[in-house]
Image (spheres, helix red, strand yellow):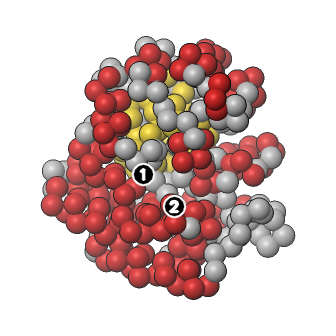
Amino acid sequence: MLGGIFPPLTTPFRGDGALDTAGFERNLEAYAAQDLAGALVLGSNGEAASLDEDEKLALVRIARARTPARTLLVGTGLESTRATIALTRKVADLGADAALVLTPSYYKSQMTQAALRAHFEAVADASPIPVLLYSVPAFTGIVFPLGLAAELAGHPQVRGMKESSGDVGLLGRIVASVPKGFEVLCGNAPVIYPALCVGAVGGVLAAACCAPRPVSALYRAFVEGDHARARRLQEAIAPLAAAVTAVHGVAGLKAAMDLAGLQGGEVRSPLRPLAAEARESLRPLLERAVEAAA
């Protein structure tokens, strides 16, 4: 189900802060022409934390309609177990193939391995669709406990995980600790090639939003055993990937999408748009990635 590359869809906004659903649809149409496994809606790069529930459900409806034959992952993790279950059931009704469940983090000092296990098990027990664990310590401040994936992998509805720390060693140890059918996705494009080498089945990668062809070409080269090409693509993609995540964040990713002819659109306040100088610094990074896949 998870083999391949998934762009974590951004959410285009108009200048007045409203959803730009037409822009969202245009992006989905562009991605449909690429060698992608599907898409993730309502992830970190989709500014899910800034969306109300009606907006979230509207985006899921559109994404399902525009990606009928590909895997649709939907982020449903909220701060309470109850709210996470409710949203998971709603997106399942709209046709989501799997729910990506973020670790709760507001009370991070209390998010012990036992607390997280109870949370994920309760969500999985109630979910009509497969559940994927989601670790992104850059946003949550929670380093995913090494043994937790193995503890949860036996649950029939917990099918995999997105690991976004960028720690390839940790990802490899998680892969080694879980049954073969438990699929691990890498969430960090600068290390996608080594992550594939240690057992990741694919990636949910921001760089795929602005440079889908180079990122999917790297995955294809790896699958076909062309490691020299995969390494060259990794080298070309890594600077762009870092720029649109760690350096400039969502505003940088949206700016790179605009440069690529996609609909990046505005960010939602309190995020700020990217300055013109920083925007132009993305152009050669994007061009280098695109040229590497030619």
Residue 81, located in which quarter of the rendered image? top right
The location of residue 34, given as percent across then percent down, is: 42, 61
Measuring 45% from the left and 44% from the top, which residue is drawn there?
165
Tell me if 10 is positioned left or right of 147 in this view.
right
Q: Position of residue 250 (x, y in %)?
A: 60, 62
Please name the amino acid that badge 1 sits on. Asn
Disc 2 residue type?
Thr
Question: Decide: marks 2, 1 in contact (CB < 8 A)?
Answer: yes
- The C terminus lies in which quarter of the figure? bottom left
- The residue drawn where x is 68% and y is 73% is 273
Q: Could you tell me residue 48's position as x and y percent? A: 69, 48
Which residue corresponds to the image point at 22% horizontal and 60% vertical from the top-left? 231
User: Residue 116 appears in which quarter of the rendering?
Assistant: top right
Does any portion of residue 41 appear in the rendered image? no
Name the residue at 49% across, 54% down: 7
* Left or right placement of residue 282 versus residue 222 in this view: right
Element on which disc 1 rests: loop
Evaluate whether residue 82 shows in this view.
Answer: yes
- Point out which mark residue 188 bears: 1
Q: Residues within 10 Å of mark 1 (few under 14, many from 20)?
A: many
Q: Measure how far apart labels 2 and 1 are at the Cα level.
A: 9 Å
Which sits in the foreground, 58 or 240?
A: 240
Q: Which mark is residue 245?
A: 2
Q: Quadrant of the N terminus?
A: top left
Which circle marks residue 147 in the picture?
none
Using the image, determine if residue 278 lies above or below residue 138. below
Q: On the rendered structure, is 11 left or right of 121?
A: right
Q: Position of residue 225 (x, y in %)?
A: 15, 50
Instruction: State the SS at label 2.
Output: helix
